[in-house]
Image (cartoon, rainbow, N blue to C red):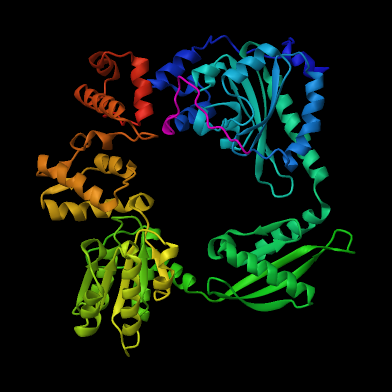
Amino acid sequence: MEETRLARRPPTARPVPADEHGLARTRVRFLTSEPVKPEEVRDSILASWRRSQHSSVPADRINLPYVTDTDLDTPLIRAAEPVLARLGEQLDGQPISLILTDRNGVVLTQRTGDPDLHRHLQAVELAPGFSYGEQFVGTNGIGTALEDGRPTHVFGHEHYAENLENLACAGVPIHDPIAGKTIGAVDLTCWRKDAGQLLVALARTTAEQIRQALLGNSDVRELALFQAYLRACRRTTGILLAFNDDVVMMNDRARRLLDPADQSVLLGHASQALADGRMSATVALPTGSKVRMQCRAVPGPRGEDVAGSVVRVKLIESEDEDIAAAVSTLPMFLPGVVGSAPIWLRCCHEVDAGYGRGEWLALAGEKGVGKFTLARCVHQRRNPTGRVHSLDVEHGIDAADVRRELIDDPVDTLVIRHVDQLTPDGRRDLIDVLEEVLKAPKPPWVAVTLTSDTEDLGELMALFPRTVHIPPLRRHVEDLSELVPLLLSKLSAQLTCSPAAMHLLMRASWPGNVPQLRQVLKTVAQRRRVGAIQPSDLPAEYRAVARRPLNRLESLERDAIVHSLEDTDGNKIKAARLLGMSRATLYRKIHEYGIVTPTR
């Protein structure tokens, strides 16, 4: 049979050349940042090498994540098992492995008829539970096929990781026959010396057989519902859901605008409306929004039953939509605040809208994200001549302080910082004063800041109808292009930031948020007082982005490598010689620590 002949390399199968074109040398040149000519490696492989390098995948070892709670009772496995079992019987005893993965490249099953190949695959962790996603192991038949979304074969030295260079693999994504989305991949792996183009053809055939099995196992009612959902999607850009007892589908707008609790309530009301024979209803959702829904039953394939329901939803009053529209159309000017990232602008508009309504707000977020600054600047925008004061729990406050600011000599705006650090008695006293303030005809605007929502603050938070979550700096690093010049202008009127240095700053995770950024720039300004900040002006830790926390010894090693590369203008051979390590070790360390090498 054809499948059995595959592993024995019949004359019709084209063997992989034994590196006659210098592919191994091409790979080494690529890994050491030397130029690679396009004709020396296939375009798809070179693109995958670049993605792997950008993801800092180690090229000299295998270190994969392991998933302990893999679900082995899925439609994909049920459809694939008979197909792979039949093929496994045909290839029994041959050095070829049949591998099934989920959409993330996590190996679900592995069938290998040859004990030597099986042991080798175990050694390189190509085994159930391990993820062969391209971002973890680099170029390979599974991860690259899933990344590119098409059949892919990777032979020998085309693999990014050197541990896989004696293998050949052909992977094909498996698509859901109804939804069309990628749900997994099938991969055939053998020794490099045994590989040929028939390996790719067999992988394609196997994937198609699994897809047909999935289609055969699909519920015809589910197929009818999905087709009705697709037709509805083509007619509307609003919120749309489709459901029956076994499946729920929703478009991106529904996922973005409806909280999970809203979705659950909406589906319950839709089911009840259909049972009562009502095609439309108005529903108040848990998050406060009110919607108008229109329901339509979808007939089954034979007309005698119901396949499910399609629900169109319209927001009757949604403050979130107003804010979203403002974010997309109106840049906001706040004195002393910069940033144009959508997630940051949304927070600005939410706080500004709360102030405009006279609604007290709680501002939550990590230390240093700008909670107090945002509240103060919104006040200055809305009431430039009004008084704004702040009280900080960390510095010690009591009810008398709050009473003085809000009742005895009321300010226009009061920001109470770090309320989550109040003692139980302090919270009770604060609640008493605030409740008294709310009785006034026109109370001052009050905002509180906290690092996280806590159950202990429930009674206090009842006085603040809305909590605005201020994002950490790492979630809107694009705003550094505006924030860095602002901070530099306060440190030195003659200092700017070069694009290369800005790129490195944007790569950092900034756990300390804006204060950490300010301290870094302050340190740089003490050494360079005029001109543009260059990458070499930044502390060593900002010229490298490690994938994990480093211990003290690793930090010293990273800094030594950074300085050596700087001293040699990015020449890795000279830097390795200065450090007393091999070029391969230096390359591995550069990727392990995420070091950006200077341009030569």
Seen in the image, is 590 located left or right of residue 409? right
Q: Residue at x 33, y 84 (%)?
A: 436
Measured from the top left, where is residue 496 in percent x and y? 17, 47
Q: Residue at x 46, y 73 (%)?
A: 322
In the image shown, does 578 or 70 lie closer to the viewer? Answer: 70
In the image shown, does 250 or 471 lie closer to the viewer? Answer: 471
Asked whether the viewer can see residue 498, the reply is yes
Measured from the top left, where is residue 42 in percent x and y? 53, 24
Measured from the top left, where is residue 75 in percent x and y? 75, 42
- The image shows a total of numbered marks equal to 0
Identify the image quadrant of residue 352: bottom left
- Residue 63 magenta: yes
Part of the protein shown in magenta: 53-69
Identify the image quadrant of residue 435: bottom left
- Residue 421 magenta: no
Q: Is residue 567 above or below residue 390?
A: above
